[in-house]
Amino acid sequence: MRRYKELVIEKFLLFSALITILTTVGIILVLAIEAFKFFSEVSIFDFFTDTEWTPLFTIKHYGILPLLSGTFLTSFIAIAVALPLGLTIAVFLSEYAPKKFRNFIKPSLELLAAVPTVVYGFFALTIVTPFLQQIIPGMSGFNSLSAGIVMGIMIIPIISSLSEDALNAVPYSLREASYGMGSTRLQTAFKVAVPAASSGIVVSIILAISRAIGETMIVAIAAGQQPRLTANPFVPIETLTAYIVQVSLGDVQHDSIEYRTIFAAGITLFVFTFILNNISHWVKNKYREEYE
Amino acid sequence: MKNDLIILPSAQPSFFKSMGSDIINTKTSSNEPVIESEVITNNQEITSVKKSEKKEYQILVKNVNVFYSEFQALKDINMEVSPKSITAFIGPSGCGKSTFLRTLNRMNDYIDSFKIKGDIFINGKNIYNEKIILEQLRKDVGMVFQKPNPFPKSILENAIYGLRIQGIKDKSFLAERAEDSLKQVGLWDEVKDNLKKSALALSGGQQQRLCIARTLAVEPEIILMDEPTSALDPISTGRIEELIFELKKNYTIVIVTHNMQQASRISDNTAFFYLGELVEQGKTNDIFTNPKYKRTENYITGRFG
Ligand SMILES: Nc1ncnc2c1ncn2[C@@H]1O[C@H](COP(=O)(O)OP(=O)(O)OP(=O)(O)O)[C@@H](O)[C@H]1O
Ligand SMILES: [Mg+2]
C-alpha cells in the first residue's frame, strides 16, 4: 500500500515536470514554425537590414532594426537608472546599514517589483512624462526616456536584492582580514566584498537586462507605437514587445503575413532573452564558490 | 599625513620597528626618572599611568573588563607585554582568549553588544581613546586568524593587499615587498612561478602562511594570532611554529593556542585564562614547570579542558 502511494506521488511529480517541459517545447515549436513560415515570404537579409518596419501599411517593410533599437534604447535607459542605484543600495545595505534597517528596507524594496507593470506604465505616461516635458521642451508625449526611467525604477530591486544576497554570502572572515590590515569600511566593501561577490552581481545585472528587454506594459503604454530606428530618447518609438501587443490586440487576420510578423518579433525577443539567461547560468556555474 | 611614514619604500623595515627598538635600548630601571621629551614625541598623553611604565611595555593592559550586553566575558585583566616577545594565551574554550586578543586591535568594535572598561596602551598610546585612528592601529597591530582566510584573489594580490589599501601603486616596490614577505614565511619558492594563481588553490597550510605574509607586508609591530594552526596538519603546524619563532626577532607576537606543547615550545610568556579571569601569567617555563595555582596545573596537565 505504502509503496503504491509512493509510486503515485512519484508519477505525479514526473507528470508535473513533463507538463512544464512540454509547454516550453510547445511554445518554442509554435514560435519556430510560424517564424519559419514568415521567413519563407520575407528574406532574412531584408529582415535584418531594412530600416523600416511597416507590415501593417500598404507599402510593407519588414526590417526588425527599428523594433530592436526601440527595445535596446528603453532597456539601456532602464539599466542606466537601475545599475548605479541598485548597486549603491546593495552595498549600503550589506556593508553599512544596521541589520534591523536592512531587514526592513530589503522587503520594502522588493515591493517595487510587485507593483503591476500597468501601474508603472501609467505612472510614466501621466506623471513622469509631463514632468520631463517641463525640463525638456519639445519632448513627445510618448518617448523612450520616461518609459526607460520608470522601467529602471521597477528593476532596481532585481539588482539591489540579488546583489545584496551575493554580498551577504561573502564570508565575514574576509572582511575581518581586510579590517585587520587597516582597511576602512569603504575599502573593504569595494576591494574585498564586491569583487568576491562579482559573479552574483553580474548575474543580477544580466537578469535585470533580460527583464528590461522583455518588459511589455510600460513601454506599450508610455513609449509609443511608432517603429523608428533612432537613438533619440525624446521621440515615440516601438519595442518588440509593444509591437506584439499592438498586433495581438488588433484585428489582423490569422494565418496572414501580418499576423506572422509577431512571431518573427517574438523569436527575435526569445533569442535575446535566451542568450542572456544562458550567460547568467554560465557565470553562475563558472564562478560558483570562488570563496568558501 | 599618517600614511607618509609607511609609503616611503625604505630599506630599513619601517619607522615603527625602530621605535620599538628604541623602547628596548632606553629600558631604564623603573625608579629612574624618565625624560619627558623622549616619551612624548609620538604619543598623545592620555592617562595617569606612569610614563616609565608605559614606555617599557609594548602592550600594557590596565583593569580591562569586557561585556557582551550583560554577560561579562573578561574580568579585570592586567597584563604587560614586552617588545619582541611571544606571549601565549591558554585556557579552556569560552574563557575569553579570543575576546581579549581582539580587544588589542579593536576588532571587537564591530560587535554591537561589545563594551569595554579599562585601558589598553600600545606603545604608550591608549588605543580606546577616541583620537586613535583605527586604520593606523590595525596597521601597527596585525592579525592572523584561526581559519586561513585569503581573499579570492591571486597570491600576489593577497600579499600586497595591505599596501594597496594604503594607496601604494609603485609596481616594482609592491613586487619587492611581496617577495620579501613571501620569503619570510617560506612560501616564495613554492609559489614564485604561480603568483597570478588564485590563493584559494593553495593548501590550507600554504594559505595560512600566505595570510601571515599578507600581515607582514604591512610591517606591523605586533602580530596577534588566534589559534593560527588549529585548522592545519602537523607538518604545516610545525612550519608555522618555526616561522613564528623566527618572527620574534622583529615582531611582538601574541598567540592563542589550545596546544600546550605549542605554547611551551614557542612562547616566552604564558597567560592562563579561566572563565574570563586571567588566573596566572608569567614566564612560560615557570608556568609549565611550577604553576602557582592548582587550576593552571590541572589545565596544563590535561586534567580538565
Ligand atoms: N559576539 C559575542 N556575543 C556574545 N557573547 C560572545 C561573543 N563572542 C564571544 N562571546 C562569549 O564570550 C565568552 C568568551 O568567548 P571567546 O570567544 O573569547 O572564548 P575563547 O577563549 O576564545 O574560546 P575558544 O577557545 O573556544 O576559541 C564566551 O562565553 C562566549 O560565549
Ligand atoms: Mg577563540
Image (cartoon, coloured by chain):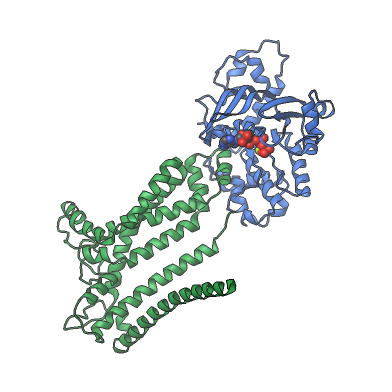
Residue A88 image position (x, y, % from top left) = 40, 48
Q: Looking at the picture, does residue A5 appear above or below residue B276?
A: below
Q: Residue at x 24, y 67 (%)?
A: A220
Specify whether A166 is left or right of B304: left
Task: State which chain is coloured blue.
Answer: B
Q: In the displayed image of the protein, which residue is found farthest to the front?
A: A1
Q: Residue at x 55, y 45 (%)?
A: A172
* Quarter of the displayed picture in which ligand 2 can be seen: top right
Percent of width and height locating residue A85: 36, 51
For residue A66, which quarter of the picture?
Answer: bottom left
Examine the rendered structure and indicate whether residue A228 appears above or below residue B304: below
| Colour-to-chain, green | A
Left or right side of B108 for B282: right
Counting from the top left corner in percent of width and height, residue B211 is at 65, 45
Q: Is residue A74 visible?
A: yes
Residue toward you, B91 or A32:
B91
Quadrant housing residue A73? bottom left
The residue that appears at 32% across and 86% down in the rendered structure is A39
* Picture coordinates of residue B75, whole percent (x, y): 63, 24
